Image (cartoon, rainbow, N blue to C red):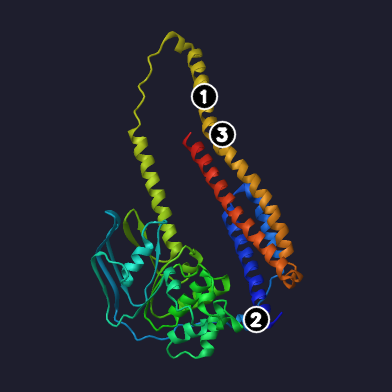
Amino acid sequence: MDKAQRMELERSAYDNQQAMIKQAEQFIIRFRAKSTKAKQVQSRVKQLEKLERLELSESERTIHFSFPPAMPSGRDILQMDQVNKSFDNKKVFRDVCLSLQRGDKLGVVGVNGAGKTTLLKIMAGLEAAEGDISLGHNVVLTYFGQHQAQELYGESSILDTVYHAAQDMTVTKVRSLLGAFLFTGDEVDKQVQVLSGGEKSRVALAKMLVKPANLMLLDEPTNHLDITSQEVLQEAMAQYEGSIIVVSHNRAFVNSFVNKVLEIRDGRAILHEGNIDDYLAARKQLEEDKAGQQKKEKSQKKPQKSAPVKTEQDASGSGDRKEDRRLRAQRRQQLNSQLKPWKNKAAAAEKQVEKLEKRKEELEVLMADPDLYADQPRWLKVSKEYNEAAKQLERQYAVWEEAQGKIEEVENES
């Protein structure tokens, strides 16, 4: 095994362990307050305490990247006023207004299909739209989208493709960047035409990043990057003096450097100050306030019961007691009927969680053994199974959380 292969295997092992640690920490934070998950939480805490942490070699740790300097822009970077976009007479979004200034770093969020990529293309001048869009004085814009991987010249090598796009960057610096994006040693001499789709996407991203610019537009830049590459890019973006507009499902990646969030929801664009955590906290508070207001309005609309006319039977109280018992039994039956499907769903999910957790713990024991990394085929097999188990576990957590939430909701309403 040559040095490049050894370093790649070492980085892969490190990244997988970091992902495992992150998942365990997220589980602890998520379920710390749940009494039903106390045992699993303590298990995760002990597991992290016992884990033998892998370290990267010095050469791996020193990989870094900084953006090439660009001329300073004016104070105003981008202005959008009353921007509308439709496809086949269907409105994607309407009346979008946005004003960004030098140094702003904006994350664009929204559900799939909300129009995030379309909005980014409009900003880049690649998509037509109604309304006014203008760039500020001396703004130099670069754009990365997934389609750019198909626009690379196939007969050029990876190194030539990126080096010829760079200005005032040495071959050594370009090689360092490519190393951060998983192209090491002789791999940089591969022709673009023999690369996979994911590899081409990484080359296109690297090519975009070496061009001097003071406004970067990026659409899902981390899709084909490992954790180490994401961290290199993340650190560079945090230190970048220009402006950034980024669409990404990777919350952890975006959260550390954005200072504004643009939410695309129901055809509208809403600007929030702060990072992703601040935006989510604001959304949660808004939803809680809305739910509280609806509950208050509902209680105010509830008709007042008129006092019943007393009868001789009422005077004895036996009729009331029988009726109360009947009503209570009826309410219990209705409640059980509502709860049953959610309880079944929660129980099934919990059973799957226990099964997957057990297998995941077994795989983690294997992955904690340094000898495993020397056997590359076995490491890849264990790593693949671990990643699949982790994905399934995350899905089952979501199912369990949804079911528990519905159970609590039904019980509170009753």
| Of the two numbered discs 1 and 3 in the rendering, the one whose residue sits closer to the viewer | 3
Question: Dot 1 lies on which element?
Answer: helix
Which residue sits at x=60%, y=53%? 392
Question: Dot 2 lies on which element?
Answer: helix
Establish if 76 lies above or below 47: below
User: In front here: 314 or 225?
Assistant: 225
User: In front here: 145 or 327?
Assistant: 145
In the image, is 115 to the left or to the right of 137? right
Q: Give the residue pinned by disc 2.
A: 4
User: Separation of disc 1 and disc 2 at Cα?
Assistant: 72 Å
Sequence-wise, the earlier of marks 1 and 2 is: 2
User: Separation of disc 2 and disc 3 at Cα?
Assistant: 56 Å
Question: Dot 3 lies on which element?
Answer: helix
The circle on residue 328 is 1
Q: Give the residue pinned by disc 3.
A: 340
Please tell me in which quadrant of the rendered image residue 181 appears: bottom right
The 10 Å Cα crowd at callout 3, few under 14, some 14 to 19, many 20 or more, is few
Establish if 236 lies above or below 110: below
The 10 Å Cα crowd at callout 2, few under 14, some 14 to 19, many 20 or more, is some
Q: Are marks 1 and 2 in contact (CB under 8 Å)?
A: no
Please tell me in which quadrant of the rendered image residue 360 appears: bottom right
